[in-house]
Each structure stands twice: as structure tokens, then as C-alpha cells.
Amino acid sequence: MQTYLAFDFGEKRVGVATGNDFTKTAEALTTISYNNKDQLFEKIQAFIKEWQPKALVVGIPTHPDGNAHEMTAKAQRFANQLQGRFNLPVHRVDERYTSVSVENGDDALAAQLILEQYFSEQS
């Protein structure tokens, strides 16, 4: 059984979820609020130390038609930074509908949906 951490990236908040590839289920953990990237990556490092994930999963937002927008490049950059800083595999998931499908913009729940989508794509 391998553990994964998933992230729903935003410019002020990042949703975090965990799950495993045995049950293929995910659980929302928290939403990280941050003022700068160093603060964000410090908090993520604590999650990585605690959960010891095999890999990380990042939701990549696009327009409904699949075309990129401003946040697409920012989420891609975040995924690249995760990989560079923590030397873990980073998987990207199309998350064009997850953030809008959760109630009250719950970023942790969006991260949970991103991870569940990743698991379903691996089946």
C-alpha cells in the first residue's frame, strides 16, 4: 500500500488530501493559507514528513473546453517546484471541474476529488 498527497493549488490557499493506492480512496486533510511560497513549501514539507508519500498529485485547471488559462501555468509551475524541492514523482490531473463542484470552495475537498480522479484513471 502506497500513500499519496494531492494538492488543489491556489494563489492564496492550497487544498491538501491524502489517500492510498490499495483502497483507492482519498481524504481531505486541510487547506493551507499562505503569504509567500517559502511559507507554503515549509507547510508542505511537514505533510510530506508526516505522510511519507510515494508520489504527489496536483490538479491542473483548464477552461471547460480544455484550453489553458492563467491558473493552468501557475499550477504547472507549482507541480514543477514540488518535484524539484522534494524529489518525488508528481502526477498531474485535469481538474477543470473539481473546484467548482465542491461546496463553498472547499479546497481540501477539491484536493480529495483530484486524488480520487487520479486513482480512477490508474484503474
Image: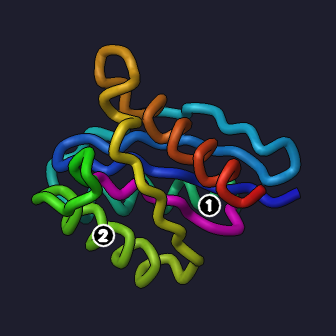
Amino acid type at mark 2:
Gln
User: Within 10 Å of the Cα at label 1, are there few (<14), some (14-19), or many (20+) other Cα atoms?
Assistant: few
- For the residue pair 13 and 21, the one nearer the viewer reads as 21
Image coordinates of residue 120 in percent, x first then y, are 69, 48
* Rendering quarter of residue 98: top left
Image coordinates of residue 66 in percent, x first then y, are 28, 57
Judging by the rendered image, the residue that carries numbered circle 1 is: 49
Judging by the rendered image, the residue that carries numbered circle 2 is: 76
Give the magenta-colored segment's residue range. 53-61
Image coordinates of residue 68 in percent, x first then y, are 19, 62
Label 1 and label 2: CA atoms lie apart by: 23 Å
* Rendering quarter of residue 3: bottom right
Q: Residue furthest top?
A: 103
Colour logic: rainbow
Quarter of the image containing the C terminus?
bottom right
Please determine whether, in this image, residue 51 is positioned above or below residue 41: above
Please determine whether, in this image, residue 25 is positioned above or below residue 77: above
